[in-house]
Amino acid sequence: MIGTASLGPVGAPVVLPGGVAQVPELREAAVTATGLARRFGRRWALRHVDLRVEPGRLVMVVGRNGSGKSTLLRLIAGAIRPDRGRVLVGGHDACRDAEAVRRQTALLGHASNTYDAFTALENLTVTARLTGTPTDRDALTSVLDRVELAAYRDESVAGFSAGMRRRMAFARLLLQTDAVAPRDRSHKASVVLLDEPYAQLDWPGFRFVDDLVRSLAARGMTLLMATHLVDRGVSLCDDGIVLEQGKLRWAGPAAWLGTRSGRELLDRPEGRD
Amino acid sequence: MQLTAVVRKDVLLQWRSPGQRVAILAFGVTVLLLLSFAAGPNTGALRPLASGFLWLALLLSSTLALADSFQTEMEQHALEGLLLLPVSARAIYYGKALANWCQLLVLALLLVPCAVVLYDVTITRVLALSGVLVLGTAGLSAPGTLYAAMAEQAKAKQVLLPLLLFPLVVPVLLASVKATALLVTGDPMRQVGSWAALLASFDLVYWSLCGLLFNRVVEH
């Protein structure tokens, strides 16, 4: 088991099973977590996680239910505060400089973050107004078109299915990741956090997520993606981390998780080696 | 810009739920009616109590309106979505508080004619009364928005909001009732100005402090 992970091409190579890396910091990391811990009630959802992700890396976050994947992503996005440790995103502390961190991150969580009383277009308009992106109907319709909701743009979100709500959440994410040119370039997110992006989506939706991840990679953005679809994650991501009961169990190349040894690691709970 | 966006969003949300607005108004009218029954049929006895009953009805209805403004935010975790954007928590607070203020003011303006009919009062200084309503509802809206955000995250949200809000707004309630009573029953000593100034002072304190505290309330 490892307690520290450094993911990316800069400095020392990525950590392989059984190793602990202390990497010289040659340039500013996209995400740095140090001694990160978060508790919900009496249960520690995340325990002393150290992580360093270099800019432009695609990282898959794997683990069983309750292993701390969502908590890790939400801590990085500044949605929740750590009980111990700290998170830096692009050098900004997620607690002390939360607004700067939110400017640099875009989180796709489990909820759609929409207003049921509004139409799809109105929901996007709210996000666009607050992020300083163009609010004209055509620009926002083109975003809805990317998530295949353009035909429903004037319909209330209250009548949307779970999959359609998920697509609305993707539309919000696209606004934050520069799908349409923002008026203020500083509003463009550079670290994208996807929490179970394939959940509730149909087959074309799966392809949409794959294409989105590839397009984010092509634009040099950093991505952390929590998923149970290991094969899909392996085919898309550079690196992988495995969380178990809130602890970082393994970190290394994503491709290794697709091997027999990787499968065995995922299938076998810690302590049953 | 962000403040305007939040105000526009909240006003539109209120506009989109007319059933809820009518229910809140109906609740306020019912409170006025019940209080008039409790005081008895003598209009002479009712008149001096009219201003107190009006503000009590407004306070009780305002808890429904304030709670509703955050319930909408919690349904699909919309508030969390707002907080994840590069938007200052202060802009979100002041946007919501301003929208709630507008809503409470409209509610107050609709309850006044009902009070006039039920309690047989005559209002001559309409403009001055409007000023007191503006200041009084501002004093309810600022702490109400903060506490509604706090209560919405708790399990006993229906109980918690009035429990937290009522003791805090006692000074606003007293000043509003006194100023309104002077406008309704006569103000030979010209005291309304002092009560209005006191109300404005409370408003200033509440609007400043609550804006500073909102970030603490919504952060998990």
Image: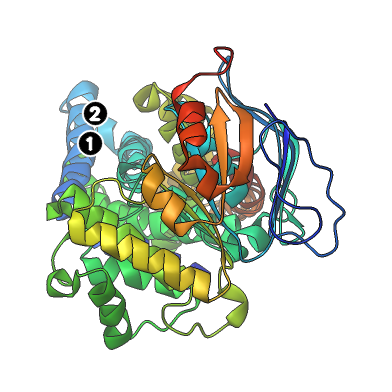
Q: Which mark is residue B35?
A: 2
Q: Chain of mark 2?
A: B
- Is residue A170 left or right of B210 when viewed as pictured? left
Give the labeled residue for mark 1: B32
| Residues marked 1 and 2 touching at CB (< 8 Å) | yes
Residue A82 in percent (x, y) is at 67, 35
Q: Residue drawn at (67%, 64%), measured in percent from left and top?
A: A55
Observer-nearest of A160 and B93: A160
Residue B43 in percent (x, y) is at 20, 35
- Is residue A99 left or right of B108 when viewed as pictured? right
Distance between mark 1 and mark 2 Cα atoms: 5 Å
Residue B123 in percent (x, y) is at 31, 57
Q: Chain of mark 1?
A: B
Residue A43 in percent (x, y) is at 56, 17
Q: Residue drawn at (56%, 54%), measured in percent from left and top?
A: B196
Classify mark 2: residues with Cα within 10 Å, few (<14), some (14-19) or many (20+): some
Q: In the rendered view of the protein, which quadrant contains the N terminus of chain A?
A: top right
Q: Residue flagged by tag 1: what amino acid is it?
A: Leu
